[in-house]
Amino acid sequence: MENPPEAVTALSCEKETSLSAAMQAYFAKCDEKLGMVPNVLKAYAFNTEKLEAFVAFYNDLMLGASNLSKLDRELIAVAVSSVNRCYYCLTAHGAAVRQLSGDPALGEQMVMNYRAAALEPAQRAMIDFAVLVTEDPARIVEADRQRLRDCGFSDRDIWDIAAVAAFFNMTNRMASATDMRPNPEYHSLAR
Amino acid sequence: MENPPEAVTALSCEKETSLSAAMQAYFAKCDEKLGMVPNVLKAYAFNTEKLEAFVAFYNDLMLGASNLSKLDRELIAVAVSSVNRCYYCLTAHGAAVRQLSGDPALGEQMVMNYRAAALEPAQRAMIDFAVLVTEDPARIVEADRQRLRDCGFSDRDIWDIAAVAAFFNMTNRMASATDMRPNPEYHSLAR
Amino acid sequence: MENPPEAVTALSCEKETSLSAAMQAYFAKCDEKLGMVPNVLKAYAFNTEKLEAFVAFYNDLMLGASNLSKLDRELIAVAVSSVNRCYYCLTAHGAAVRQLSGDPALGEQMVMNYRAAALEPAQRAMIDFAVLVTEDPARIVEADRQRLRDCGFSDRDIWDIAAVAAFFNMTNRMASATDMRPNPEYHSLAR
Amino acid sequence: MENPPEAVTALSCEKETSLSAAMQAYFAKCDEKLGMVPNVLKAYAFNTEKLEAFVAFYNDLMLGASNLSKLDRELIAVAVSSVNRCYYCLTAHGAAVRQLSGDPALGEQMVMNYRAAALEPAQRAMIDFAVLVTEDPARIVEADRQRLRDCGFSDRDIWDIAAVAAFFNMTNRMASATDMRPNPEYHSLAR
Amino acid sequence: MENPPEAVTALSCEKETSLSAAMQAYFAKCDEKLGMVPNVLKAYAFNTEKLEAFVAFYNDLMLGASNLSKLDRELIAVAVSSVNRCYYCLTAHGAAVRQLSGDPALGEQMVMNYRAAALEPAQRAMIDFAVLVTEDPARIVEADRQRLRDCGFSDRDIWDIAAVAAFFNMTNRMASATDMRPNPEYHSLAR
Amino acid sequence: MENPPEAVTALSCEKETSLSAAMQAYFAKCDEKLGMVPNVLKAYAFNTEKLEAFVAFYNDLMLGASNLSKLDRELIAVAVSSVNRCYYCLTAHGAAVRQLSGDPALGEQMVMNYRAAALEPAQRAMIDFAVLVTEDPARIVEADRQRLRDCGFSDRDIWDIAAVAAFFNMTNRMASATDMRPNPEYHSLAR
């Protein structure tokens, strides 16, 4: 832990803007629903435009219309973050898997090694693809996409799997590059 | 080239929404200024909300206020895309480096191996960090950030370097996962 | 989870011997002190000689006289198991770190990425060496040992760090090769 | 060679105990049968309990009842040590392969690249599994175990293959971490 | 660019011999046909025997009798150089692919990621083998050679594919080790 | 051993030319001096021009004028071949190290892990550079060359180190791609 206990990241970015009304409302809603404002949002809050762009992008991906359930998207988030060993995202999204699945061991398995989890074959193929996207995107070929179609995924589903996997490859790196620290509340959630 | 000549990606995502007025205007502006609508925008256009979220995020990062010049951001884009061997992003952003720098060989060097480019020491440190963020984010420690501060970068600059590097780790993976094809116009630009 | 719910590993090894009196007593003691017999012991129990050799080796390393505290040894165990992504050992020894340290977040950090943990410099050097022993033993040179001496470790301490790190490189592989499953009780311990 | 000519490792661990009678007898037996006491035993001898635990574990694995022949176990030892590039174990167990097989070239092939050796298909599958256990234990799945069953190996045989492979992943790391030096006699044995 | 603008490599090797008549004629022919003497030849020219040996070896491989077309050999050269990220060879042989194929985009694709190129199945198998030879020669087995035979390649063709791939693994390393700089004329050739 | 006992490689390349008089004389000289014709020469002999180009290149590098002793060049050959795990070259050049050094253990150490060998600091730097050239040529920077100069190597010496290391990266791949088998005589040479 290289940044002081109160800090959200290792970087001191001066406040450049005040929070827009929309972002103030969003923070209030987080506080009400989660009992906290996730530190990633506080990290982006030095510039309300950056925060809004991040929130819009995140909410479309993780909460927008998709055939992938919210749990599916969180499983992808944790599998990707495990490859990248991202402390922030494993903590926050590991908690989300525990909550959404009601299965604390599943959250642990996804953090530690998803191959230990009792995933359905289609879910397993989805996670295998997300991990391939993470580890070796340059080697992806049509056969990799076809494997997902053969499990019943549509092309739009493949878009969504790729988009969530790609997104966490961004946030994992942003969190690691800035030493972003998760809210301590996550550790005991849904154990 | 696994998708048919006209296709922008290997995925057939049905049109879910019509383009918002804002996005129609944006496409027209691209056409006017670049002589084309970049294929990445066409790829997201099946859903105008996804497109808007992507465009807002992209434009804040690559065109928004920052001490990093536009060329600096494009250098990071190409260095990251070279590690990930992303055909789409190397083609589009390699062209941007050639244009913004007026130095075609620099664009080639960044695509092939940035260690062959005659970068200033601070630029080199910036690219080294972007490549570390790409290759091994889990090993980043405070000393890596300090190296940038020692070259004169502020913490806000480090945020921007990390954010651009992280973003292209997302788009590289989205492009590779969907076999996104660059507009052919890029190849001959600014040679 | 590829083995049936009751199974301890994916291998069906027929019982070859009955438990020796010493091992019966040891199992009883585990049950009394931990409320369970760790599954790794049940896995070896098909042959009481193999079990005894394993228990003797393990207890000497993890409980025998050493300048390394029991927590130090568990920190090494988890850091090594994290590199190897061993579900069994991360679960069992992650719980041990939580218990011995009284700091549940520390257990999580060691599982996810030890670089996120607030370790003392000497502890950090100890874990760095254990991770080097795990990842790239062929590249170890005298300077790596000297780095530990410079932090105040004696040659006997270095032996112990190496021995614990090496041991978990064995057990991680035994657990992964046999799909060994941790006792479910570990997940909620000391949260 | 970083330790003085007489030293067995780069660590100076003070003698903590005298050799137990059992271990004295064991050393005498080694001397009689091999013409030397293997240096690994001398390395552990600073503490007779550690030595006894190591000897018991080693002898059960390498000499105990198993369907794997002693040569099979030595082939695994060398293949694992080759991946880990362990000078001590390649020297000592390479000699054992030469002796037990009566085929000096086979010993060399296992040291250099086991894919050059004329192994029977079942032996080759056994070594492939041992190498997988060494290189990438986190990716082992049921199909990898099944491949061995399809070659005629029982679940107990798979346990033994895994156990020998896992053990040399420990000793390779112990030898590399301590710069353990092989007895010079090994080099010319069974050439 | 670590060497001064006029230098061909980062090494200052004193002229040891004058150019043989044969090599003088060869340089004149290069100048006439290419409008330049490739820098690799100037680099070797400090010793005319080394230059002659290199030229003879190169010309046999790249211009000698073979079922592989000159374009095939250049495709292999670029694919290998892309794995090794060799700035010199990617620049010089990327230009050759653009010229011989009349398809500038193909040259770019081979530089960036050959999996993006629309290769015929047999060509793709040829390049896959050349990349395997480059990345992981120790794992090549008979099945890898058979895959080429199944695409219609003769054993002599396989020799040639291997020989060209192996050769560029040499020249890539020679160029990188000496920081060899390509003639600037290559950048704009056949765009 | 995938090719029949008599075969030199796994490829059947029809004889295309008869041996030139020069090559006949060279084979006779090998037979006289070594008691065998090295199999690599027999492998190239299907085409006497290819053989001559190879022999000229090889003899210039390994026997030509250089400040590097013949043993130095063989040490580089074996260190490179060890990284690439090339059975042919490790066997043939491991024997050469044993012969030229009069130290059989040194030959073994270079095959197994050169870090175990008692090399002089300058020799160690030479081998470290050769291994870097082999493992990661794209990351070589001026500081790597300077390290050699600081040990007393001239720029011409660096050329030679690079050239020998690069050459064995070619021949290792040629041998592995064709499953080239070493003459059995090498195994017992100079033990």
Image (cartoon, coloured by chain):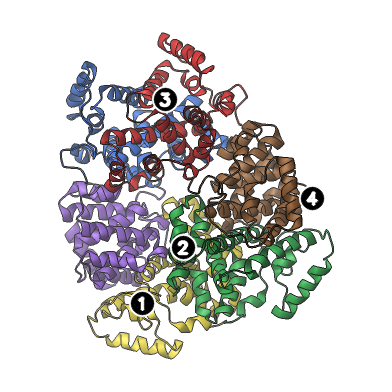
Chain colours: A blue, B red, C purple, D yellow, E brown, F green
Q: CA distance from mark 4 to mark 2?
A: 41 Å
Report if residue C181 is visible in the image.
Answer: no
Amino acid type, label 1: Asn
Q: Residues within 10 Å of mark 2 (few under 14, many from 20)?
A: many
Q: CA distance from mark 1 to mark 4?
A: 56 Å
SS of the residue under disc 2: helix
Query: Is residue B77 or residue B175 the one in the foreground?
Result: B77
Tell me the residue at 35%/49% (across/down): C5
Residue A67: image tag: 3
Residue B18 coordinates in the image, percent (x, y) = 46, 11
Left or right placement of residue C156 versus residue F22 in this view: left
- The residue wearing badge 1 is D3
Q: Is C181 placed above or below D118 here?
A: above
Q: Chain of mark 4?
A: E
Q: Is B10 placed above or below D110 here?
A: above
Q: CA distance from mark 2 to mark 3?
A: 59 Å
- The residue wearing badge 4 is E65
Q: Chain of mark 1?
A: D
Tell me the residue at 44%/66% (across/down): F151
SS of the residue under disc 1: loop
